[in-house]
Amino acid sequence: MTDLQLPTIACITGQNDTHLTNIQSHRLHSAIIEDFIALQNAAKQAGFDLTIASSFRDFERQALIWNNKFSGQKPVYNSQQDVVDLTHLSDIEKCIAIMRYSALPGASRHHLGTDFDVYDKSAVTHDYQLQLSPHEYEQSGPFAPLSDWLSTHLNQFGFYRPYREDLNGVAPELWHISHIKQSQLLVTQLTESALHACIKNSDLLGKNALLAHLPALYKRFVTNVSSP
Protein backbone atom coordinates (compact mmCIF):
# COMPACT_ATOMS: atom_id res chain seq x y z
CA MET A 1 0.00 0.00 0.00
CA THR A 2 1.29 3.46 -0.90
CA ASP A 3 2.20 5.77 1.97
CA LEU A 4 -0.54 8.20 2.92
CA GLN A 5 0.00 11.77 1.72
CA LEU A 6 -0.68 14.83 3.85
CA PRO A 7 -3.48 17.08 2.63
CA THR A 8 -3.64 20.74 1.71
CA ILE A 9 -6.81 22.82 1.91
CA ALA A 10 -6.52 23.62 -1.80
CA CYS A 11 -6.52 19.89 -2.62
CA ILE A 12 -9.38 19.17 -0.26
CA THR A 13 -11.63 21.89 -1.71
CA GLY A 14 -10.93 21.01 -5.33
CA GLN A 15 -8.79 24.04 -6.13
CA ASN A 16 -5.53 22.13 -6.64
CA ASP A 17 -4.84 18.88 -8.49
CA THR A 18 -1.18 18.20 -7.68
CA HIS A 19 -2.19 15.18 -5.58
CA LEU A 20 -3.60 13.32 -8.58
CA THR A 21 -2.35 10.67 -11.00
CA ASN A 22 -3.82 9.96 -14.44
CA ILE A 23 -5.14 6.43 -14.78
CA GLN A 24 -7.58 4.88 -17.26
CA SER A 25 -8.72 8.29 -18.56
CA HIS A 26 -9.44 9.45 -15.02
CA ARG A 27 -7.59 11.09 -12.18
CA LEU A 28 -7.19 9.51 -8.74
CA HIS A 29 -5.19 10.42 -5.67
CA SER A 30 -1.63 9.18 -6.15
CA ALA A 31 -1.69 7.36 -2.83
CA ILE A 32 -4.60 5.06 -3.72
CA ILE A 33 -3.56 3.81 -7.18
CA GLU A 34 -2.07 0.54 -5.91
CA ASP A 35 -5.17 -0.31 -3.88
CA PHE A 36 -7.50 0.60 -6.75
CA ILE A 37 -5.65 -1.68 -9.17
CA ALA A 38 -5.82 -4.51 -6.63
CA LEU A 39 -9.58 -4.00 -6.27
CA GLN A 40 -10.07 -3.86 -10.01
CA ASN A 41 -8.04 -7.03 -10.60
CA ALA A 42 -9.97 -8.91 -7.93
CA ALA A 43 -13.24 -7.82 -9.50
CA LYS A 44 -12.00 -9.04 -12.87
CA GLN A 45 -11.22 -12.46 -11.42
CA ALA A 46 -14.77 -12.52 -10.08
CA GLY A 47 -16.17 -11.82 -13.55
CA PHE A 48 -16.68 -8.05 -13.46
CA ASP A 49 -15.19 -5.26 -15.55
CA LEU A 50 -15.04 -2.68 -12.76
CA THR A 51 -14.82 0.66 -14.57
CA ILE A 52 -14.61 4.22 -13.28
CA ALA A 53 -17.55 6.37 -14.35
CA SER A 54 -16.50 9.55 -12.53
CA SER A 55 -13.52 10.45 -10.39
CA PHE A 56 -11.88 13.79 -9.58
CA ARG A 57 -14.06 16.85 -10.07
CA ASP A 58 -12.58 20.26 -9.39
CA PHE A 59 -14.28 23.17 -7.63
CA GLU A 60 -15.15 24.96 -10.87
CA ARG A 61 -16.85 21.90 -12.32
CA GLN A 62 -18.82 21.28 -9.13
CA ALA A 63 -19.78 24.95 -8.99
CA LEU A 64 -21.12 24.78 -12.55
CA ILE A 65 -23.24 21.76 -11.65
CA TRP A 66 -24.47 23.56 -8.54
CA ASN A 67 -25.35 26.83 -10.29
CA ASN A 68 -27.12 25.05 -13.15
CA LYS A 69 -29.31 23.22 -10.66
CA PHE A 70 -29.94 26.23 -8.44
CA SER A 71 -30.99 28.31 -11.45
CA GLY A 72 -33.26 25.56 -12.78
CA GLN A 73 -31.21 24.88 -15.91
CA LYS A 74 -30.64 21.30 -14.76
CA PRO A 75 -33.15 19.10 -12.90
CA VAL A 76 -32.97 18.40 -9.18
CA TYR A 77 -34.21 15.01 -8.03
CA ASN A 78 -35.63 13.77 -4.74
CA SER A 79 -35.13 10.34 -3.21
CA GLN A 80 -37.95 8.90 -5.32
CA GLN A 81 -36.13 10.12 -8.46
CA ASP A 82 -38.87 12.66 -9.15
CA VAL A 83 -37.95 16.14 -10.35
CA VAL A 84 -38.23 18.74 -7.60
CA ASP A 85 -40.14 21.94 -8.40
CA LEU A 86 -37.83 24.68 -7.12
CA THR A 87 -40.15 27.52 -8.10
CA HIS A 88 -41.65 28.20 -4.71
CA LEU A 89 -38.71 27.12 -2.53
CA SER A 90 -36.60 29.51 -0.49
CA ASP A 91 -32.90 29.70 -1.22
CA ILE A 92 -31.99 27.42 1.69
CA GLU A 93 -34.68 24.93 0.67
CA LYS A 94 -33.20 24.87 -2.84
CA CYS A 95 -29.74 24.24 -1.37
CA ILE A 96 -30.99 21.33 0.73
CA ALA A 97 -32.83 19.82 -2.24
CA ILE A 98 -29.70 20.03 -4.41
CA MET A 99 -27.43 18.58 -1.73
CA ARG A 100 -29.45 15.39 -1.58
CA TYR A 101 -27.60 14.22 -4.72
CA SER A 102 -25.10 16.95 -5.62
CA ALA A 103 -22.38 17.94 -3.20
CA LEU A 104 -21.74 21.48 -2.09
CA PRO A 105 -18.73 22.81 -4.05
CA GLY A 106 -15.73 22.81 -1.76
CA ALA A 107 -17.13 19.85 0.17
CA SER A 108 -17.50 17.26 -2.59
CA ARG A 109 -15.65 14.04 -1.87
CA HIS A 110 -14.85 13.96 -5.59
CA HIS A 111 -12.44 16.84 -4.95
CA LEU A 112 -10.26 14.49 -2.93
CA GLY A 113 -9.29 12.06 -5.66
CA THR A 114 -9.96 9.29 -3.15
CA ASP A 115 -13.58 8.86 -4.18
CA PHE A 116 -15.00 7.67 -7.48
CA ASP A 117 -18.08 6.10 -9.04
CA VAL A 118 -17.93 2.63 -10.57
CA TYR A 119 -19.99 0.30 -12.73
CA ASP A 120 -19.61 -3.06 -14.46
CA LYS A 121 -18.84 -2.29 -18.09
CA SER A 122 -19.31 -5.94 -19.10
CA ALA A 123 -22.91 -5.96 -17.86
CA VAL A 124 -24.21 -3.53 -20.48
CA THR A 125 -23.85 -2.80 -24.19
CA HIS A 126 -21.34 -0.27 -25.47
CA ASP A 127 -24.09 2.26 -26.20
CA TYR A 128 -25.74 1.95 -22.76
CA GLN A 129 -26.54 5.33 -21.21
CA LEU A 130 -25.15 5.15 -17.70
CA GLN A 131 -27.35 6.96 -15.19
CA LEU A 132 -25.74 6.23 -11.82
CA SER A 133 -29.21 5.72 -10.42
CA PRO A 134 -30.32 3.42 -7.56
CA HIS A 135 -32.33 1.12 -9.84
CA GLU A 136 -29.16 0.17 -11.72
CA TYR A 137 -27.48 -1.19 -8.57
CA GLU A 138 -30.39 -2.81 -6.77
CA GLN A 139 -32.45 -5.99 -7.28
CA SER A 140 -32.53 -6.78 -11.01
CA GLY A 141 -30.44 -3.80 -12.11
CA PRO A 142 -27.50 -4.49 -14.45
CA PHE A 143 -24.95 -3.62 -11.80
CA ALA A 144 -26.60 -5.42 -8.87
CA PRO A 145 -24.17 -8.39 -9.04
CA LEU A 146 -21.17 -6.04 -8.90
CA SER A 147 -22.81 -4.11 -6.09
CA ASP A 148 -23.27 -7.29 -4.07
CA TRP A 149 -19.65 -8.28 -4.69
CA LEU A 150 -18.45 -4.85 -3.58
CA SER A 151 -20.48 -5.11 -0.39
CA THR A 152 -18.50 -8.21 0.53
CA HIS A 153 -15.03 -7.31 -0.72
CA LEU A 154 -14.51 -3.54 -0.63
CA ASN A 155 -13.03 -3.35 2.84
CA GLN A 156 -10.33 -5.93 2.24
CA PHE A 157 -8.86 -3.61 -0.41
CA GLY A 158 -9.10 -0.52 1.77
CA PHE A 159 -12.31 0.95 0.34
CA TYR A 160 -15.87 1.55 1.57
CA ARG A 161 -19.14 3.25 0.64
CA PRO A 162 -19.58 6.57 2.47
CA TYR A 163 -23.16 6.81 1.19
CA ARG A 164 -24.14 3.21 1.83
CA GLU A 165 -27.28 4.06 3.78
CA ASP A 166 -29.75 6.90 4.16
CA LEU A 167 -28.67 9.06 7.11
CA ASN A 168 -30.95 11.97 6.12
CA GLY A 169 -28.07 13.69 4.38
CA VAL A 170 -26.75 12.63 0.99
CA ALA A 171 -28.99 9.98 -0.54
CA PRO A 172 -27.60 6.42 -0.78
CA GLU A 173 -25.16 6.02 -3.68
CA LEU A 174 -24.07 2.41 -4.06
CA TRP A 175 -21.86 3.37 -7.01
CA HIS A 176 -19.73 5.75 -4.93
CA ILE A 177 -16.68 4.21 -3.25
CA SER A 178 -13.94 5.80 -1.20
CA HIS A 179 -10.44 4.91 -0.04
CA ILE A 180 -10.82 4.61 3.70
CA LYS A 181 -7.50 5.85 5.12
CA GLN A 182 -6.61 8.48 2.55
CA SER A 183 -10.10 10.00 2.44
CA GLN A 184 -10.26 10.19 6.22
CA LEU A 185 -6.91 11.93 6.30
CA LEU A 186 -8.29 14.55 3.94
CA VAL A 187 -11.84 15.06 5.19
CA THR A 188 -10.73 15.59 8.77
CA GLN A 189 -8.98 18.74 7.55
CA LEU A 190 -12.13 20.14 5.93
CA THR A 191 -13.29 22.19 8.89
CA GLU A 192 -16.42 24.27 8.88
CA SER A 193 -14.32 27.44 8.91
CA ALA A 194 -12.25 26.29 5.91
CA LEU A 195 -15.44 25.52 3.98
CA HIS A 196 -16.93 28.89 4.98
CA ALA A 197 -13.91 30.71 3.53
CA CYS A 198 -14.11 28.68 0.34
CA ILE A 199 -17.80 29.45 -0.22
CA LYS A 200 -17.43 33.11 0.75
CA ASN A 201 -14.84 33.61 -1.99
CA SER A 202 -16.95 31.85 -4.64
CA ASP A 203 -19.69 32.81 -7.09
CA LEU A 204 -22.10 30.12 -5.96
CA LEU A 205 -25.78 30.87 -6.32
CA GLY A 206 -27.49 30.87 -2.95
CA LYS A 207 -24.21 31.78 -1.25
CA ASN A 208 -25.79 33.94 1.43
CA ALA A 209 -28.19 31.17 2.44
CA LEU A 210 -25.36 28.64 2.46
CA LEU A 211 -23.19 30.76 4.74
CA ALA A 212 -26.08 31.58 7.08
CA HIS A 213 -26.95 27.90 7.53
CA LEU A 214 -23.52 26.35 7.11
CA PRO A 215 -23.22 24.78 10.60
CA ALA A 216 -26.37 22.70 10.05
CA LEU A 217 -25.51 21.89 6.43
CA TYR A 218 -21.98 20.88 7.37
CA LYS A 219 -23.28 18.50 10.04
CA ARG A 220 -26.02 17.01 7.85
CA PHE A 221 -24.30 16.70 4.48
CA VAL A 222 -20.52 16.81 4.96
CA THR A 223 -19.62 14.83 8.08
CA ASN A 224 -22.76 12.70 8.14
CA VAL A 225 -21.54 9.62 6.25
CA SER A 226 -21.57 5.86 6.78
CA SER A 227 -18.76 4.29 8.77
CA PRO A 228 -16.16 2.08 7.03
Image: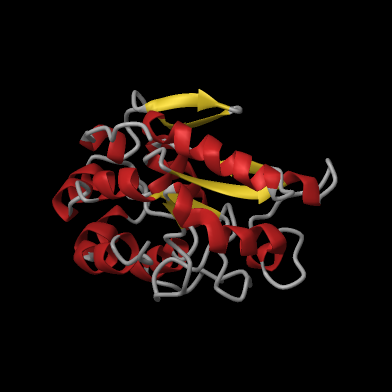
- Compared to residue 217, the image places residue 1 above or below, namely above
Q: Quadrant of residue 42?
A: top right
Which quadrant does the N terminus fall into? top left
Residue 118 in sight: yes
Q: Identify the image quadrant of the C terminus.
A: bottom left
Q: Is residue 146 above or below residue 140?
A: above
Q: Where in the figure is residue 68, as x and y percent of width and height?
A: 51, 49
Q: Nearer the viewer, residue 1 or 176?
A: 1
Give the colour scheme shown.
secondary structure
Q: Kindly identify the residue that appears in the image at 31 percent across and 69 percent down.
A: 220
Up/down of 171 relative to 50, above or below: below
Residue 132 position in % (x across, y down): 64, 56
In the visual, does 200 lie left or right of 128?
left
Which sits in the foreground, 33 or 224? 33
Question: At which x and y percent is residue 36?
Answer: 51, 39
* Nearer to me, 20 or 50: 50
User: Residue 67 location in percent, x, y?
Assistant: 45, 49
